[in-house]
Amino acid sequence: MMVSFFDQFASPVYMGVPLIAIAIALPWVLYPTPSSRWINNRLTTMQGWSINKFTNQLMLPLNTGGHKWALLLTSLMIFLITINMLGLLPYTFTPTTQLSLNMGFAVPLWLSTVIIGVRNQPTIALGHFLPEGTPIPLIPVLIIIETISLFIRPLALGVRLTANLTAGHLLIQLIATAVFVLMPMMPAVAILAATVLFMLTLLEIAVAMIQAYVFVLLLSLYLQENV
Amino acid sequence: MHCVLSDSRTIGGHDAGSQHQFTGIAKYFNSYTITGRRNCVLATYAGIAVIFLYFKLKPKKKKADAAK
């Protein structure tokens, strides 16, 4: 059996059971459920504080109509950031390397922002296709460009997350393989590669958090235009 | 087409759009007011649809005529 660097991205199936379902459900299991008590324990309090802080920050540019999305966007953020971070552990599978999952988030959420805009304020939603102050000769071209950019948005959302996570995991595996192969032959080079691997791991931790935030932030921006 | 600008106040670098007083066709099709922008977008989409339908419904020359 040929082992390739892309085997880590194959959706795992064990005895006919797709394990991706367990991988997706894992973040839910890891977080404590806030109780109905007035004062919770330290962990739950910290969790509540950080969720509130994040939600307040995200909802700042949105009006009252957009605040209905607070629960969805915050839970999406926690879900993505947890899955991305768990995927950095050795021998784990990262569901967000699957384009199907990311497109499954991006397309419906983007489409719902568009439908909200077209339904509630159709004039403003259509007006967004032409930037204010455009010179007359450029109007048709710019409208076509803005229309294309609108439909590119869900694709960009999904592919951005997929590509960043996939590329990062691939790089880690490549450089780790290089370290192992070079260790008996050229230890000095292997130590240099190990240093690069350490810095890359730090970068991937940052990328895992940033990409989850960018996904949610862009969705909130699309919502801001339409709500 | 005549555009009369009253005192322009900018909000965050963008013109509010309500200070322009367009006349003629510019009243309905301009890139400053929200309705003007909407009408330009709709007109562009209509134009694209017309061009598409024109080429779709254009009768093709029969090969028999070309052979003659």
Image: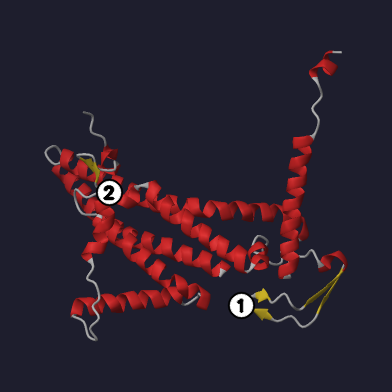
Subunit that carries the residue with mark 2: A
Tell me the quadrant of the picture where the C terminus of chain B can be found: top right
Q: Is residue A101 left or right of residue A135?
A: left
Q: Residues within 10 Å of mark 2 (few under 14, many from 20)?
A: some
Q: Tell me the element at label 2.
A: helix
Q: Residues within 10 Å of mark 1 (few under 14, many from 20)?
A: few
Q: Tell me the element at label 1.
A: loop
Q: Is residue A121 left or right of residue B54?
A: left
Q: Residue B64: percent from the left, percent from the top?
A: 82, 16
The image's mark for residue A20 is 2
Q: Residue A18: percent from the left, percent from the top?
A: 26, 44
Tell me the quadrant of the picture where the N terminus of chain B can be found: bottom right
The image's mark for residue B24 is none
Q: Does residue A138 appear in this view? A: no
Q: Residue B59: percent from the left, percent from the top?
A: 81, 30
> In the image as oriented, which residue stretches furthest toward the top?
B68
Label 2 or label 1, whichever lies nearer to me, is: 2
Q: Is residue A110 left or right of residue A44?
A: right
Residue positioned 26% across, 35% down in the render: A4
Q: Type of residue at label 1?
A: Gly
The image's mark for residue B12 is 1
Q: Are marks 2 and 1 on the same chain?
A: no
Look at the picture and state if A152 lies above or below A51. Answer: above
Label 2–label 1 contact, CB within 8 A: no
Q: Type of residue at label 2?
A: Ile
Label 2, label 1: how far apart the Cα atoms are: 47 Å
